[in-house]
Image (cartoon, helix red, strand yellow):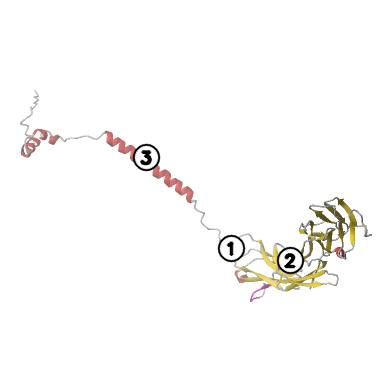
Amino acid sequence: FVFFPFSVEGQNLATDNVTVIEGEMATISCRVRNNDDSVIQLLNPNRQTIYFKDVRPLKDSRFQLVNFSDNELRVSLSNVSLSDEGRYVCQLYTDPPQEAYADITVLVPPGSPIIESREDVVSEGNETELTCTAIGGKPAAYIRWMKGEEELTGETAVEETYDRMFTVTSRVRFSVTKEDDGMPVDCIIDHPAVKDLLAQRHLEVLYKPEVKIVVTYPEGLTREGDNLDLTCIAEGKPHPHQINWLRVDEDVPPHAVVTGSDLYIENLNKSYNGTYRCVASNAVGEAYVDYILYVHDSRAGEGAPQKIDHAVIGGVVAVVMFAILCALIVLGRYFARHKGTYFTHEAKGADDAADADTAIINAEGGHNNTDEKKEYYI
């Protein structure tokens, strides 16, 4: 049983309130602080004696003695029903008599929730409505809604029945998209007498086709003389029952071949340029996608310049610059080692001249201050 201790005391007498789930066991304890040999007895809500000391006058075998002493009378009640709910009396025969009261509250779990839908199948963009009912609980249940990981807000109505039970109904409305197809919607029951009680329903959503075009051939540019092969892929719920090819504002070329979802045109030329459309439809609606055809010259793309590898060019430039730098360093070191003062023959003697005029005379051949060597030939 579920036991919530709540002490209820008289002058010398104490007991506890009890909360129990229907069908389980409740225990009532009448305790005496200082007993002077006074008699303890337990009475039911109708003030019928259940136990007088350790004797059970009441012919209800669900009541059993758990403990009897001068200080306590403890009694168990098995298979508790809603009719057992009420105020029980612990009574001590003193002068004057003393009483303490134990209230038994019975919880009744609701039945399994029932979830219903206004319609079994709903089209995307439309609103759907779900109803969940929890019957026969006490106290009234609380109903929560979850759509996948999203919590929904419902409208709740509570009805109390003749037997002090409650029926709770919750209704939720929301619009659906194609992503909701197959999505679980949970009706979750919160109640103190039960855990993990829920009902689940999966949404079934119809949606119009989703269309795409795949170019099977050619892989690159469409050139004159090439063949063109297009495939239209359409998915929807229900599956598309019709797929059509057309050319926007013009007729499809007379020798184009349409096979199911495939469009095949051979020996292309520029007159075939235009917009080709694949249209798919189902019971919900239709959708389309376009392919724009542009036919290039037969040699288009052949003379395209090769891609320049900028990384290679950068590497070559770096090597050349490094070589030039090394050459400049070597030449600089060479000239630094051979630098000096050089004199021409005409400047000989100018260093020893007393002034500029003398230097000029000496430079022109006047060697007044130097010994002159003479050679004679015989």
Residue drawn 64% across the image and 74% down it: 248
The dot on residue 145 is 2
- CB under 8 Å between discs 3 and 2: no
- CB under 8 Å between discs 1 and 2: no
Label 3 – label 1 distance at C-alpha = 53 Å
Q: Position of residue 360 (x, y in %)?
A: 8, 38
Q: Nearer the viewer, mark 3 or mark 1?
A: 3
Going by the numbered disc 2, the residue's amino acid type is Trp
- CB under 8 Å between discs 3 and 1: no
For label 3, the SS is helix
For label 1, the SS is loop
Q: Nearer the viewer, mark 1 or mark 2?
A: 2
For the residue pair 75 and 19, the one nearer the viewer reads as: 75
How dense is the environment of label 2, judged by Cα within 10 Å: few (below 14), some, or many (20 and up)?
many
Q: Position of residue 366 (x, y in %)?
A: 6, 34
Asked if residue 234 shows in the view, the reply is no
Which of the 4 image quadrants contains residue 351? top left
Residue drawn 33% across the image and 37% down it: 330
For label 2, the SS is strand
Residue drawn 72% across the image and 73% down it: 127
The dot on residue 326 is 3
Label 1 – label 2 distance at C-alpha = 64 Å
What secondary structure is the magenta-colored segment mainly? loop
> According to the image, label 1 marks what residue?
298
Q: Earlier in the sequence, mark 3 or mark 1?
A: 1
How dense is the environment of label 1, judged by Cα within 10 Å: few (below 14), some, or many (20 and up)?
some
Which of the 4 image quadrants contains residue 227? bottom right
